[in-house]
Image: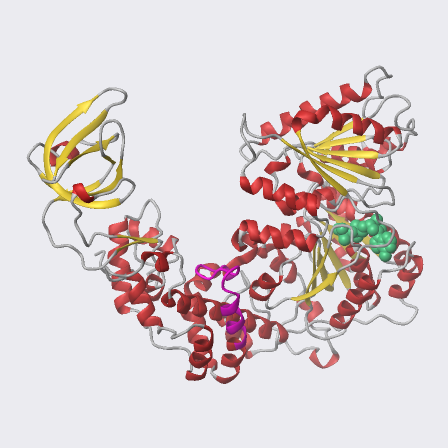
Amino acid sequence: MPADAPKPTPRKELSAPQKALHKLGLVRSIDLALHLPLRYEDETRIVRLADAREGQTVQVEGMVTHSEITLRPRRQLLVTLDDGSDTCTLRFFSFYPSHQKALAVGARVRVRGEIRGGFMGRTIMHPAFHAAGGELPNALTPVYPTSAQLPQVYLRKVVASGLARADLSETLPPELLGSLQAVVRAPWTLRDALRYLHQPGPDVSLDALEDRSHPAWQRLKAEELLAQQLSQLTAKRERDALRAPALRTAPGGLHEQLLGVLPFALTAAQRRVGEDIARDLARPVPMHRLLQGDVGSGKTVVAALAAAIAIDSGWQCALMAPTEILAEQHFAKLIGWLEPLLTPLGKRVAWLTGSQKKKQRTEMLALIASGEAALVVGTHAVIQDQVVFKNLALAIIDEQHRFGVAQRLALRSKMSPAAEGELSPERRGAGFARPPALPLEGRSGDAQRASDGGAPHAEPHMLMMTATPIPRTLAMSYYADLDVSTIDELPPGRTPIVTKVVSDQRRHEVIERIRAQVAQGRQVYWVCPLIEESEALDLSNATATHAELSEALNRGSVAPAPLPLLAEEVEAPAEPPGAAGVLVGLLHSRMPVAEKKAVMALFSAGHMGVLVSTTVIEVGVDVPNASLMVIEHAERFGLSQLHQLRGRVGRGAAASACVLLYTPPDGGRLGETARERLKAMAETNDGFEIARRDLDIRGPGEFLGARQSGAAMLRFADLATDGHLLDWARQAAVHMLAQHPQAAEKHIARWLGTKAEYLKA
Ligand code: ADP
Ligand code: MG
């Protein structure tokens, strides 16, 4: 029955509410105990109607003196309640015959709801009600986060019983309780904190409870952050126990040759991060490094240098990008540099993409399996099951924030057992037993420890790249097991991008500006709005803008030649832009890949003056001659997305600009958040500053996106306000793992246990 907390019983059929509990991750007693109220309702008192204020949520008790169903303006049930001090109307738009019966004239009822004014006198809309009388509770009533299948009343009972049964014994050793005291005055025990938060007495301050500043909340947040730090630290130690091939480049080898053929000198920042990476690769432990650098900071060449080291040591390297067009655009240069150096070695570059023909794909798979392909480049196709590497040693993920945790893990598991055997001579024939790939990082680590009886298993080195930098508190919290290298300078000779925020009413002026740019031989991007509800609308909008610009820019000139449809046709020499009208291209996600490639090829080659696109160009595209970026309905984009888009211009020496076109809602003003975002964009070009403001505006949950944060998402702590607790938790975790490993394990299991279970499923 409901009062019993359900246990994980995979064989028995679960009831509907039990299933709903499981869906919320509420499986063990402790999970229920840690499921905390969103807010509270005060049912401890009955208020006299004469004393109730408008806007107040109150509980009143009285007699029904009138009840009727009216049909105008809508069918509704109107009930008059009289408590002797005053009367008020109860109003229901949806109701059953049972409502009418319970609220018949003469019935005495207890009613809860918000008092509102109005021309019919004081009203409570859709109040909760039951028969009058009955004992009043002596604590506030908690309101829990729940789902449609899980009634609040049921959940309350289950949580109360979970709280009564859960093991809430202290996991913190005395010295950590002491250090916590320095951060939180008079810290509570977990047991007291939970009791208090689930069943606060009638006289507590609701404000302190609801803004989570109360010491009981502080204790919970501290505990939660500690669990997260412990699990991250454990994951890091586990990774340090793994093996990876030690990769070194020989003097005069590929690395040096590549540096020799680059058309530019590396920036100091590129050299520095390159050294970080080379140092990691030389160790027999898998690298797990995030390379962050603003858009255009030159991450690709750093990736190419890392690949050169792996290939020079006789191993394979895989490069993965989120979309085909990016893979191609982004890696074209890299391949252009590396391929001529590989050919004399009898090595090749293999491509893997979703749109490939079967025959070509089969060929590529064979190249990869034989090891002839030293470098494998592609999209998600790289992590599919059929792809078997001969000896993968380095996996590079570009724009890593666009990939899920599972995809990154899949790439990690691509090292073949045969290759593992070759890590070092003494390991040969040691009989590597490969544990199954782990479903998610941030788990408690039990699974892995269980398999530690044998030799440690091997993984490739991982280099993840991103242009969306992670603010410091987030890096400390979510990526404690990740090493971070940062490219903090742009290649020389770039002129800063000037950003203007412009109302759509001045669209014609923007089009004039485009005309001027194109006349100077420059190129322009025009990005169309993201309409989340409908891909079709997205498209029609882009198509309409494409038509509008083609018409406006070609008025009075010879129409441009029709678009060639295949990439091969692009080679035909085109007129310089401007002479015979302006070629305006269209790019959107539903176009066939061949067509997308043809359009991109025309734009890259400089034959196309203007490219209208949906957000497919968001990341990675590199056309230095493009000097103007127009973003339509900029108010609909997120801050980091706007920054990514803007980074498509300003890649050459020419002065570049970004125009953020906004359309206020009919007659109104832009919303606060949208205004803040556009202002931030106009004020700074610095990706780190943008990331910091983005975090302020959105909060860490949205900033990271659920799929990135994986199991590590915080429920209670808020990194914007709880930095002091995070600092404590970081130090406490190191100490606890070293001095009290069992308590640490218990603490992790308490906080993350079910999640780990769930994630394994
Ligand atoms: P991102 O970090 O956004 O991936 P890219 O790797 O695409 O940036 O580099 C942006 C542009 O800068 C490319 O055209 C690249 O060839 C060029 N570039 C990279 N490093 C340098 C450098 N040290 N000096 C001059 N240009 C560079
Ligand atoms: Mg890039």
Q: Could you say which quadrant of the image residue 588 lies in? A: top right
Q: Quadrant of the N terminus?
A: bottom left
Q: Could you say which quadrant of the image residue 600 lies in? A: top right
Q: Is residue 645 left or right of residue 756?
A: right
Q: Is residue 51 left or right of residue 150?
A: left
Give the number of callouts. Answer: 0
453 or 172: nearer the eye? 172
On screen, 124 above or below 620? Answer: above
Q: Is residue 757 left or right of residue 474?
A: left
Residue 647 lies in the magenta stretch: no
Would residue 86 be seen by someone viewing this image from the given angle? yes
Q: Residue furthest left?
A: 106
Q: Residue at x 71, y 68 (%)?
A: 419
478 or 11: nearer the eye? 478
Q: Is residue 676 left or right of residue 277?
A: left
Q: Which residues are magenta?
A: 712-731
Residue 85 place in picture, x, y as percent:
12, 40
On screen, 160 above or below 364? Answer: below
Residue 622 place in picture, x, y as percent:
80, 44
Q: How is the image coloured?
A: secondary structure
Residue 726 lies in the magenta stretch: yes
Q: Residue at x 15, y 25 (%)?
A: 68
278 or 674: nearer the eye? 674
Residue 280 place in picture, x, y as percent:
73, 71
476 or 493: nearer the eye? 493
Would residue 387 be seen by someone viewing this image from the given angle? no
Residue 361 place in picture, x, y as percent:
73, 46
